[in-house]
Image: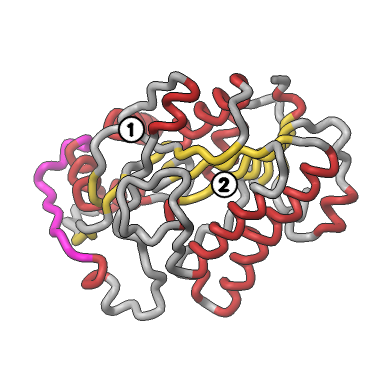
Amino acid sequence: MDSSRFLIIGANGQLGKALQGRFPKAKAVDRNKLDITNLDSLQAFDWSNIDVILNAAVYANVDGAETSEGRIAAWQVNAQAVSYLSKIASQHDLTLVHISSDYVFDGTKTPHTEDEPFAPLGVYAQTKAAGDIAAAMTTKHYILRVSWLIGDGPNFVRTMIGLAAKNISPTVVADQIGRLTFTETLVSGIDKLLQAKAPYGTYNLSGDGQPASWAEITRAIFANLGRDDLSVTDTTTAEYFKSKPTAAPRPLQSTLDLTKIKKELNLALPDWRASLKNYIEDEQAQKI
């Protein structure tokens, strides 16, 4: 497909930056250039030279979505705006690529298949589930369900690298289980779906390999940094958030079943541990 006819929405986020790296000829917009929460703004946009909408825009503050202001923003960006994009895609016969989340499930089953019924726990999760429903209303859609995204921006791995630099041995949740998804893995999968003209629908996409807890991931981060002198103390989600009554509930099981996308594309997804090693090496190289 001609990537010059792609439109990247949410261009300045972790995924938006990665999509621009993958599709340098694509048009890229942030909210200042195109307000997707405003239907009039979308209707006035020139869609004549667009074939594919890559929606990387998201309100991702899981705990912030539990506040009165955050709740409104989350619903506007994660649900209402997606319904507008779905409508635009139908009107102009465009393909809509939308990014979903493991949070649309309550985390009581594992692994999560694409057809598992929605059971979102918090406001952010509810808005993401609503966004999935909205995206699916246009015929030509790909919904990519992702867990624990890591890219160029604030994220868990960078936070732990920062703690290591301060010689801090953290206490980390050990009962949330899943796999990291690096933006490079995600954009590669999106590219392959589009190039292969795979059947429209929902696809799980994350790093492959043995699932792990956040505490185990932290140990892997420290090991890659050569900081075996730092320890990681396990805790439970309930204990960790005991002093944070306004925090959103988290699904405990976030592992996604990758069978569908691997079979459809004959795709070998990278082990998240190998991607983590490469990511940390790149982070360290940038500091030299």
Cα separation between marks 1 and 2? 23 Å
Residue picked out by circle 2: 13
In front here: 227 or 61? 61
At a point 45% along the width and 37% down the height, the residue shown is: 205
Residue 187 visible in the current orientation: yes
Coordinates of residue 180 in the picture (x, y in percent) = 35, 42
Quadrant location of residue 237? bottom left
Between 70 and 204, the one nearer to me in the picture: 204
Quadrant of the snapshot with the C terminus? top left
- Is 77 placed above or below 162 here? below
Side of 119 relative to 169 (left or right):
right
Q: Is residue 233 above or below residue 72?
A: above
* Picture quadrant where residue 21 is located: top right
Q: Where residue 33 sits in the image (x, y, percent)? A: 78, 49
Q: How many numbered dots are placed on residues in this image?
A: 2
Kind of element beneath mark 1: loop
- Relative horizontal placement of residue 155, taking residue 11 as reference (left or right): left
Residue found 59% across the figure and 60% down from its top:
130
Residue beneath disc 1? 208
Question: Is residue 173 rendered magenta in the image?
Answer: no
Give the magenta range: 224-236
Within 10 Å of disc 2 (Cα), the crowding (few <14, some 14-19, many 20+) is some
